[in-house]
């Protein structure tokens, strides 16, 4: 079984069509009554709504999703699982992934409920339907509660990859109807009653024209009913409570001479940041690449004041750029994943807490709700936390928009950097950030536009730029030039570009599961995590790679799911990393795949040079000028505002 690349969610071809008019009318009436206050949310359900499970007691934070530094140990595959998969028409090779998703009881669980196959990443509803029919017979009802519960969870998991921690109830029901569920309202009610999903009420934001932080304040916000996954609910509530704990235990500036440190800061913005941190437990800091010097100055000043300080970045490359800004030998630069896993940073104390007075998180826009919750749970009472990032960049490949929600909720100092990114690339990216695609002067060819007519020409010109033109003009090795493109599929996606680049840069038969020694690869052990490395060798256990942190093994059973060639990556994969030169490929069929945030992220990855292989024509300027995409649906902003409203004035 292979997962289709098509992101659409078609209704199974053999499913009975939903009674769309009557179902939609009943659903709209139910949602209208709840959201207007005429009917309490509880009345939508026949039994009490389940509460989120209790938060964990303080202690070592679990390593979640993007925080995992290494591939997880393989779960033993039950002896009968491969045969069960084969009986359902699924490849036996899927057994390892099924066991990883469902645990040691995977065989029994899947035999009882074939739609649990949807818990395996990459499996789609039509594939799970076919698997269920093969095991249980062709007369399965599209409203089978096992199917509708699995579909509800699958829809929310898909939404989580796009940043949503919850979805409006009406949206979930509409999508269930699109998959042939005959009574979406009943399916939603059943999923909640079974504990498969949780239901919430909160107040929908009412943005005003030009609104930013605290948008919609003072306006009566309508109530909305949301459905969410337990893990997302726990993460956002734990994060909100953790931030409240830091605020509640903050003791003020203390004895440190913050004023002197601010006066000695290398820039006005750095001084402003130091003063803000002196008086607050939580501070938000925003700016571009050049602004990273400001939190670095804060960490250096804090270390000079005798405080225990640490700065965490999203990627090893970001950690390296940060370390270059800190005093030599300080050892205060880490990655978020390394800090959470214990591979980097200070050793946790007896209570499982990080012995820190100050934690600065750079690239904070890449934090998922889960990784942010883990960080905050790991901080001791009285610690300070700085969330620093660029809100114009693409968000995380997982649930949450932590930095955006903290900024929108208000309630903490926000320091806006006044340090611009330098050079023609910086000028171009700054314009994109405000919706303008500028024609910038580039006397040393810092920015080059390469028009192309079709994807084939785009691939040809990209290979030419990476292997010849850019290395020759700027004295770079081909490995210092990174290609960024909108997606993996298509005639100019990462697969096609990587195949063409491998043929020129490291030709070979791909004798190790499609890879050869010397291949540049992109290892993604979890959504939002990317490690660029070089293939060294292979043995019976898997493929050995050499990356920024030395050699590491990718087990053979994880190769197909976590490893791709890495000469070309997507903008989401590139977030948090920069290269001396970048080639951004925009084929003509990419118009619907790029927006302002995508262009801003891709164009800002090069430190010295940017080439744009331009097949979009005027559509590129249109994508930049179009209003920013609606943010994902999350609950953190509402939770933070509720907490702020409960704090007594003064």
Image: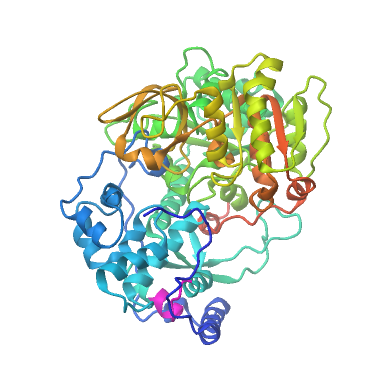
Q: How many numbered tags mark residues here?
A: 0
* Residue at the (50%, 46%) spot, across then down: 397
Asked if one can make out residue 581 in the rendered structure from this viewpoint, the answer is: no
Extent of the magenta region: 179-189
Please identify the quadrant where the N terminus is shown: bottom left
* Residue at the (49%, 75%) spot, across then down: 177
Residue 390 in the image: x percent, y percent?
63, 38
The part of the image, by quadrant, that contains residue 371 is top left
Q: Is residue 265 magenta?
A: no
In the picture, measured across the screen, residue 11 lies left or right of residue 591, that is left
In the picture, measured across the screen, residue 594 lies left or right of residue 126, that is right
The residue nearer to you, when weighing 524 against 538, is 538
Residue 34 in the image: x percent, y percent?
52, 78
Q: How is the image coloured?
A: rainbow
> Of all residues shown, which one is farthest toward the front?
509
> Of all residues shown, which one is farthest toward the left?
79
Q: Is residue 188 magenta?
A: yes
In the picture, measured across the screen, residue 180 lies left or right of residue 450, that is left
Residue 342 in the image: x percent, y percent?
34, 30
The residue nearer to you, when weighing 467 against 376, is 467
The part of the image, by quadrant, that contains residue 262 is top right
The residue nearer to you, when weighing 450 against 247, is 450
Above or below — where is 298 with respect to 304? below
* Residue at the (56%, 25%) spot, across then down: 504
Residue 502 in the image: x percent, y percent?
52, 28
Asked if one can make out residue 261 in the rendered structure from this viewpoint, the answer is: yes
């Amino acid at each position: 079984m292979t997962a289709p690349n098509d992101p659409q969610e078609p209704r199974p071809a053999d499913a009975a069509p939903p009674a769309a008019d009557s179902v939609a009318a009943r659903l709209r009436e139910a949602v209208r009554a709840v959201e207007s206050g005429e009917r309490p949310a509880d009345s939508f359900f026949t039994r009490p709504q389940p509460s989120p499970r209790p938060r964990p007691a303080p202690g070592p934070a679990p390593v979640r999703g993007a925080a995992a530094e290494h591939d997880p140990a393989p779960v033993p595959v039950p002896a009968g699982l491969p045969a069960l998969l084969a009986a359902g028409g699924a490849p036996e090779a899927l057994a390892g992934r099924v066991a990883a998703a469902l645990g040691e009881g995977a065989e029994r669980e899947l035999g009882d409920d074939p739609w649990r196959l949807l818990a395996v990443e990459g499996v789609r509803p039509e594939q799970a339907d076919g698997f269920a029919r093969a095991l249980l017979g062709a007369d399965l009802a599209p409203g089978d509660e096992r199917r509708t519960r699995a579909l509800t969870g699958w829809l929310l998991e898909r939404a989580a990859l796009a940043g949503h921690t919850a979805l409006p109830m009406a949206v979930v029901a509409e999508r269930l109807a699109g998959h042939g569920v005959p009574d979406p309202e009943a399916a939603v009610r059943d999923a909640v009653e079974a504990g498969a999903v949780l239901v919430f009420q909160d107040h929908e934001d009412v943005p005003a024209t030009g609104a930013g932080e605290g948008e919609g304040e003072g306006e009566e916000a309508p109530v909305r009913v949301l459905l969410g996954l337990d893990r997302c609910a726990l993460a956002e509530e734990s994060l909100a409570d953790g931030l409240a704990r830091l605020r509640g235990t903050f003791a003020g500036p203390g004895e440190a001479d913050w004023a002197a440190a601010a006066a000695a800061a290398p820039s006005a913005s750095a001084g402003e940041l130091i003063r803000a941190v002196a008086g607050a437990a939580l501070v938000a800091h925003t700016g571009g690449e050049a602004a990273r010097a400001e939190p670095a100055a804060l960490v250096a000043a804090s270390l000079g004041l005798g405080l225990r300080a640490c700065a965490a970045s999203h990627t090893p490359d970001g950690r390296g750029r940060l370390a270059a800004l800190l005093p030599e030998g300080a050892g205060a630069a880490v990655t978020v994943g390394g800090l959470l896993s214990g591979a980097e940073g200070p050793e946790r104390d007896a209570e499982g807490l990080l012995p820190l007075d100050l934690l600065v998180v750079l690239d904070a826009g890449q934090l998922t709700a889960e990784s942010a919750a883990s960080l905050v749970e790991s901080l001791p009472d009285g610690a300070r936390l700085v969330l620093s990032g660029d809100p114009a960049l693409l968000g995380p490949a997982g649930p949450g928009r932590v930095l955006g929600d903290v900024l929108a909720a208000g309630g903490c100092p926000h320091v806006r950097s006044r340090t611009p990114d330098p050079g023609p690339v910086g000028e171009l990216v700054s314009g994109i950030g405000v919706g303008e695609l500028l024609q910038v002067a580039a006397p040393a060819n810092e920015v080059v536009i390469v028009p192309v007519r079709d994807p084939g020409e785009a691939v040809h010109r990209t290979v030419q730029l990476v292997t010849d033109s850019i290395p020759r003009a700027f004295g770079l090795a081909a490995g210092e030039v990174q290609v960024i493109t909108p997606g993996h599929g298509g005639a100019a996606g990462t697969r096609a570009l990587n195949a063409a680049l491998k043929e020129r840069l490291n030709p070979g038969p791909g004798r190790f599961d499609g890879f050869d020694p010397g291949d540049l690869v992109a290892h993604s052990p979890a959504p939002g995590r990317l490690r660029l490395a070089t293939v060294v060798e292979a043995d019976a256990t898997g493929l050995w790679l050499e990356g920024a942190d030395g050699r590491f093994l990718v087990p053979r059973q994880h190769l197909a799911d976590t490893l791709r060639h890495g000469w070309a990556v997507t903008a989401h994969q590139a977030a948090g990393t920069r290269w001396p030169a970048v080639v951004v490929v925009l084929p003509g069929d990419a118009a619907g795949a790029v927006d302002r945030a995508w262009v801003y992220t891709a164009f800002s990855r090069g430190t010295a040079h940017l080439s744009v292989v331009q097949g979009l024509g005027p559509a590129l300027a249109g994508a930049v000028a179009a209003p920013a995409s609606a943010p994902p649906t999350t609950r953190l902003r509402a939770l933070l505002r509720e907490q702020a409203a409960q704090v007594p004035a003064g």
